[in-house]
Amino acid sequence: MAAKKQTTAKGTVKKTDVPTIEAKINRLVNRKDNNIKAIASVNIGGAFAVHGIKVIDSPKGLFVSMPSNSYVDREGRIQYSDICHPIIAEARTELIDTVKEAYEQALEEQQTEDEAEEEAETEAQGQGQSQQM
């Protein structure tokens, strides 16, 4: 765990520890017309859960988006406001890295499952052809 000294409003210094963060990919999104690639949840320190975190593919690469509300500003533009987010840089880095690792692992598991299904289909087709002869 990383510890950081933080100054409070009263000027006292306290140490901040980044709690353990566990991530779970709830759903992979495999639609060509959508830049959202996955929906995740995180468990922070075994005491706090955050659902609705998105893994998004952009021209700059993958990024993690916290749950947010949208609203229209005075100029009529849609704006987004995070519902919750990490306060310190170390916690943000830990959360993003953990979610991205869970996403990569979920992709690998899906690829393995897809390959096993393809292999089973090929095997079933081969058995069907040999029975016909």
Image (spheres, helix red, strand yellow):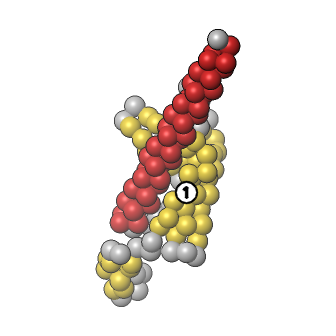
**Which corner quadrant holds the C terminus?**
top right
Drawn side of residue 98 relative to residue 82, left or right: left
Q: Residue 73's spot in the image, x, y percent?
A: 60, 42
**Residue 8 position (above or below residue 103):** below
**Which corner quadrant holds the N terminus?**
bottom left
The residue carrying mark 1 is: 24
Give the residue type at disc 1.
Lys
- 16 and 34: which is toward the camera: 34
> In terms of image quadrants, where is residue 47?
bottom right
Kindly identify the residue that appears in the image at 54 percent across and 30 percent down: 119
Q: Residue 126's spot in the image, x, y percent?
A: 59, 21
Whether residue 108 is visible to the viewer of this picture, yes or no, is yes
Q: Residue 105's spot in the image, x, y percent?
A: 46, 49
- 95 and 69: which is toward the camera: 95
> In terms of image quadrants, where is residue 46?
bottom right
Drawn side of residue 71 relative to residue 22, left or right: right
Is disc 1 surrounded by few (<14), some (14 to 19) or many (20+) residues within 10 Å? some
